[in-house]
Each structure stands twice: as C-alpha cells, then as structure tokens.
Amino acid sequence: KHEDALREFRTAVQIQSQVLQKKPSDTAIASNLADSASWIGTILQELGRLSESQSAFMEAINIIKPYHLSGKDTEASRLYAIIVLYQSEVAIRRGDVSSAKKLIDEAKGIFRELSLHDPSNSTWKNSLLSSDTYLLSLVARHDWTSTERDIQAHAGAEFSSLIKADPSNLPFQINFLEIRRLGILDLLTQGNVQAAQEAAERAWSEWQEAIKGRTQTAEALYAETRFQETIGTVFAANGEHEKAAAHWQESVQKLEASQNPDPAFLAIRRLLALNLGQ
C-alpha cells in the first residue's frame, strides 16, 4: 500500500516538474508539485525512513520557497510553513530538538503574519496554534514555567472558540485534544492528580462526543490512543488501576487493528505494553 502510494506520488512529481519548467511563474503548479513532494516525505516518515523523508520534505520546501518569498501568494506561504512543520516532525523523531525548534519558530512566524493579515481565517489561526502545540511538546514537563502554562491556556481557549464556530472540523478537535493532554500532564507533574483526572475525563468525554459516527483518520487515531495512554496514567496515579488498564488495553487493540507501520504508532504501542507490564 505505501509502496504503491510512493510510486504514484513520484510519478506525479515527475510530470508536475515538467509542467512547471514550461510555466515557472504559475504558483498553482508549483504548489501542487510541492504538495506531491511533501506526500512522499510523509509516507517515508510513516515507514520510518527518516533520512529519506527529510530529503523529500527539503525538496518540497525548495520548490515552494521562492513563491513564498515573493510575498505575492498567501497560499504559497501557508504551504511553505506547513511543510516546514512537517520537517520539524522528522527532526523531532531523529532527536534533533534544536533544529525542530528553529523550524517550528519559522513556521510560527509565517502563520502569525498570515493571521494578522486575515484575522478571520480560522485555518491560519489553527496552524498558528498548532505551532504553539509543537513547541510545548518539546519542553520537558518538569521544565514548564508560567510561560508554557500561559501558552497552553491561551491555545486551549482559542481552540475551544474555533470548535464552537465549527464543531465538525476534525483537525480543530485533534489539536484541541492534544493541547488539553499537555495541560493534563502538567497538572500531573505538579502533583494535582485530582484536577488532572477531572480535566482528563472531561476532555475524553467531549472528544468521544465530537467524533461519534465519524470515520476515523490516522491522525485522529494517533491523537486518541496517545490521549488514552495519558488518561490511563492519570487514573493509575490516582490509584484507579482497573480504569487505567482498561484505557491502555483498549488503545492497544485499536493500534493492532489499524496495522499502521508509522514508528509513532509503534512507540505508543511499546509505551502501552510497558504500562501493562507486557
């Protein structure tokens, strides 16, 4: 399945490259080409081929960067920033936190500029808030200060507002669940176990209601199983070991059913196995 997708996107890149050579000023063609190249990076990342993935994302960045720098097309700038964020994910998985932070900061700056030019654009606001989430995830829990907590609280409130305006938007829901998860882990780190449990149960209930009857994407499954690992940890910290084990076991079953080879899914699976004493 992944190899078939790789062949299709590589063929698309070849064709789109030839078209762009004939129409180098066409931003739409360049965007399609960069998007195809970034899909190659995403698939390689899912397969754990991180060095190749990094190269593919760099190729995509180099394609769209001149159109972003021209300042004439906001969509080109948005795509450039998104691919930079994808590149930061690879850096994180390779353990290069310093490079990841620089990439996230660059993307965040672009999203901030776009949001300032069009404050009503919820997609750009979501992207800006997502970059905050990325940055927070790079800070060790024990190193959180009032700065990180303020960022988390602000992002949570903004995501909540976006969802009230567009409750069917799954990316908003996924990002909201993750920013809440980070806040719950911070409460747990501070020793506020009861507050962490109350926040976790509320977030889990709202998430289940939000996705009821919807086809689950890989991104949603990743966010959901990651959250269930966290809520199980909260229950365990509060002495409710049966509830903890139930969440962890349910997550294991979901991950096994998905058969997703992405190393991020495998990492959650290993963590859950440790939690369950397997």
Image: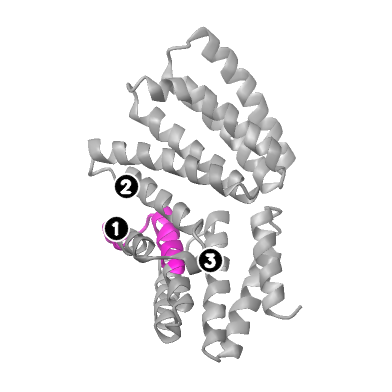
For label 3, the crowd category at 10 Å Cα-Cα, with few meaning under 14, some 14 to 19 and many 20 or more, is: many
Q: Earlier in the sequence, mark 1 or mark 3?
A: 1
Q: Which residues are magenta?
A: 157-182
Tell me: 70 left or right of 46. Answer: left
Name the amino acid, label 3: Glu
Q: Are marks 1 and 3 in contact (CB under 8 Å)?
A: no
Q: Helix, strand or loop at disc 3?
A: helix
Tell me: 9 left or right of 170. Answer: right
The magenta stretch spans residue 180: yes
Q: Are marks 1 and 2 in contact (CB under 8 Å)?
A: yes
Q: Earlier in the sequence, mark 1 or mark 2?
A: 2
The magenta stretch spans residue 215: no
Coloring scheme of the render? Answer: one colour
Residue furthest top in the image: 22
For label 2, the crowd category at 10 Å Cα-Cα, with few meaning under 14, some 14 to 19 and many 20 or more, is: many
Q: Helix, strand or loop at disc 1?
A: helix
Name the residue carrying label 3.
224
Name the amino acid, label 2: Lys
Residue 140 image point, x, y percent:
52, 63
**Residue depicted at x 56% and y 47%:** 89
Residue 67 image point, x, y percent:
42, 21
Tell me: 196 left or right of 13. Answer: left
For label 1, the crowd category at 10 Å Cα-Cα, with few meaning under 14, some 14 to 19 and many 20 or more, is: some
When asked about the image quadrant of residue 8, the answer is top right
Name the residue carrying label 1.
158
Question: What's the CA distance linking mark 1 and mark 2?
Answer: 9 Å
- For residue 125, the mark is 2
- For residue 110, the mark is none
